[in-house]
Amino acid sequence: MATERSRRRQLVILGGLFVLLVAVLVYNLNGSEPAADGSTASNPQRNRAPGQAKLTAAEELDIRLESLTEAKPEPQGASRNPFRFRPPPPPPEPKADIPPVQVEPSEPPPPPPLPPIALKFIGVVESPRAGKIAALSDGKNVFYGKEGDLIEGRYKIVRIGAESIVMEYHDGQGRQTIRLSGQ
């Protein structure tokens, strides 16, 4: 049984090889080759007239050996851009020597703005004898003052309200309203 099975396997393999051999012979005798698009292109040697002589490999491929000995152009330096598809634009025309016109400023620039007042309004104390007294803080110290007093020698209290205070620098510039922060 095992020998009959192996013999059958050998016959199947031999038959497959025979079919493959026949296909190769038919292909070579026909002279057709499948082209890239699936059609068959005939062999150019077969289609030649009987009186035509065989072409050599150099004639068939159109090789120009003399072009190998020609001088090649030198590469152009930094002006070559492989990513540009148009010729470069012409260089700009040189400008005439015109002296630059100097414009003198008509007014000096305005002085920089004064920095904001760095105090926090933390509360109001009202007394019948002294009136309204504001409590201010710079984060380290607490300052007290009435309307018209100087705080820290730099700031003047202009008006004290219930929820805000109006202050300015001692020279009358940089008026600012500071709201009650509660801190």
Image (tube, rainbow, N blue to C red):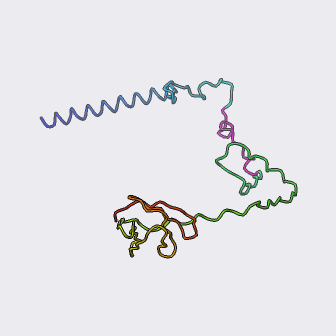
Quadrant showing the N terminus: top left
Q: Is residue 7 left or right of residue 70?
A: left
Magenta stretch contains residue 68: yes
Residue placed at 14% from the left, 37% from the top?
2
Q: Name above or below for residue 1 compared with residue 81.
A: above
Q: Name above or below for residue 59 compared with residue 96.
A: above
Residue placed at 35% from the left, 28% from the top?
19
Magenta stretch contains residue 124: no
Q: How many discs appear?
A: 0
Q: Is residue 94 left or right of residue 147?
A: right
Q: Name above or below for residue 104 compared with residue 138.
A: above
Quadrant showing the C terminus: bottom left
For this orientation, the residue located farthest to the front is 129
What is the x, y in percent for residue 71?
77, 53
Residue placed at 55% from the left, 64% from the top?
174
What is the x, y in percent for residue 88?
74, 47
Front residue (pair 134, 16): 134
Identify the magenta region: 54-69
